[in-house]
Image: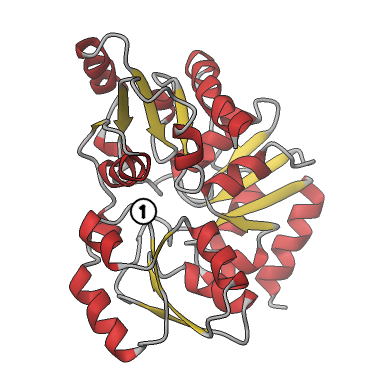
Amino acid sequence: MSSINEEIEALKKSRNAVVLAHNYCRPEVQDVADFTGDSLELARRATQVDADVIVFCGVYFMAETAAILNPSKMVLIPDATAGCAMADMITGAQLRELKAKHPGAKAVCYVNSTAEVKAECDMCVTSGNAEKVMKTFASDQEILFVPDQHLGGHVSNMLGRTYELWPGYCPVHAALTAEAIAAARKLHPNAPVMVHPECAKAVRDAADERLSTGGMCAFARESDAKEFLVGTEVGILHRLRKENPGKAFWPVNDKLVCPDMKKTTLENLAASLREIKTRVVVPEEIAVRAKRAIDAMLKIS
């Protein structure tokens, strides 16, 4: 174990801290985390930790969610500039304006949204539970789905319903194409293709499975296939390979890298624990309202 890994382990004990890391984080960060998962897995885990301090390795909206769910705990993020382009594509004011145009509609937000947007919503969803959660709405209920048009389109197609979709998207997943999938299949014809539902419809249609990163891990573990093509941010490959040493995983496009997810390093993680920085605080009036939407989701999923 390296000296910085040893320091992190010692600091976790002295601070009574737990480290949560998203599947897209750097491999070395995933390896020192107490738990690695997708947005749904991490949201659940954030409500179960027995620690005074939660260090969230990922992007800011994820740390906000942990802070909302744990008002009595200290939530830290190693790099406060780790944002999410998709989450920034809608503001609370824009959502309020949209709601005013659709009286009676229910507002549903993807977890990849800011706390102020969650506070304006009736329900929150993740890519791992969106279909299950959206089934609970009446088929004739008008739905405003923000901010990801692709996840919203995927769920509406699966359920045969129509939603008002905000035109947000993930720039990383937008770089994946159906042509790239076709080329990858030629190299690995026996490998099922897994893509994230944040991908565009043409990409989702070209794939075999449309799954959250947690869903990809479960599918890979349970499948008889010996190799897989993976269409999402390349950070997931570390966990897939680590958990399935007898199987091979190939990126459909090895350029799918989220720079914000890579901002957490062992160095700034150690500094975060050592110096107790940067604390994520959500204003109470926003946190209380946002928690209702998150709790509504967790109750169903």
Q: Is residue 137 above or below residue 181?
A: above
Q: Nearer the viewer, residue 79 or 248?
A: 248
Q: Is residue 49 above or below residue 122?
A: below
Q: Nearer the viewer, residue 44 or 162?
A: 162
Residue 242 in picture, x, y percent from top left = 61, 77
Q: Nearer the viewer, residue 284 or 272?
A: 284
Q: Residue at x 66, y 52 (%)?
A: 19
What colouring method underlies this structural image? secondary structure
Residue 48 falls left or right of residue 77: right
Residue 118 in picture, x, y percent from top left = 43, 26
Q: Quadrant of the N terminus?
A: bottom right
Q: Residue at x 70, y 26 (%)?
A: 72
Residue 282 in picture, x, y percent from top left = 51, 25
| Quadrant position of residue 230 | bottom left
Q: How many marks?
A: 1
Query: What is the crowding at mark 1: few (fewer than 14 residues within 10 Å), some, or many (at least 20)?
Result: many
Q: Quadrant of the C terminus?
A: top right
Residue 180 falls left or right of residue 12: left
Task: Specify the amino acid type for callout 1.
Answer: Pro
Q: Nearer the viewer, residue 80 or 258?
A: 258
Residue 205 in picture, x, y percent from top left = 27, 61
Q: Residue at x 30, y 36 (%)?
A: 147
Residue pointed to by mark 1: 197
Residue 222 falls left or right of residue 98: right
Q: Is residue 69 above or below residue 119?
A: below
Give the SS element for disc 1: loop
Q: Is residue 83 above or below residue 109?
A: below
